[in-house]
Amino acid sequence: MQFQITDIEFDFDDYDDEALSVDEAYEIVCEVYGQIWEADDEDDLVEEITTAYGWCIKSLNYRHILK
């Protein structure tokens, strides 16, 4: 299945030793918006994004892309 990210909130506070500036966090979030991901289900989608970016996800909204 394909998913397009419409909103995402990463847990940037989860890692004390990897503090990000507001601009860096904003850039990461903007990079994810609109991307289309291939995943089996919502859990797999979360795992794919977490693996790709290295940050846990607090919340995620998406839409299914129909072929």
Image (tube, rainbow, N blue to C red):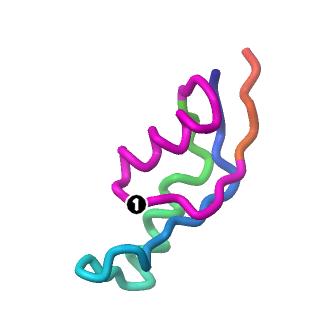
Q: Which residue is mark 1?
A: 55
Asked if residue 22 lies left or right of residue 8, the reply is: left
| Percent x, y of residue 29 | 52, 63
| Percent x, y of residue 40 | 58, 23
Residue in front for this viewpoint, 47 or 5: 47
Residue 4 lies in magenta, yes or no?
no
Residue in front for this viewpoint, 58 or 20: 58
Q: What crowding class fits label 1: few (fewer than 14 Cα within 10 Å), some (14-19), or many (20 or more)? A: some
- Residue pictured at 75% horizontal, 39% vertical: 63
In the rendered picture of this protein, how many numbered marks are placed on residues? 1
Asked if residue 67 lies left or right of residue 54, the reply is: right
- Residue pictured at 53% horizontal, 62% vertical: 30
Residue in front for this viewpoint, 41 or 38: 41
Image quadrant holding the C terminus, namely top right
Residue 56 lies in magenta, yes or no?
yes
Amino acid type at image mark 1:
Trp
- Residue pictured at 30% horizontal, 82% vertical: 16
Badge 1 element: loop
Residue at the extreme top: 67
Image quadrant holding the N terminus, namely top right
Residue in front for this viewpoint, 23 or 40: 40
Q: Is residue 67 above or below residue 65?
A: above
- Residue pictured at 58% horizontal, 38% vertical: 43
Q: Which residues are magenta?
A: 38-61
Q: Is residue 5 above or below residue 66?
A: below
| Percent x, y of residue 3 | 65, 34
Q: Is residue 53 above or below residue 39?
A: below
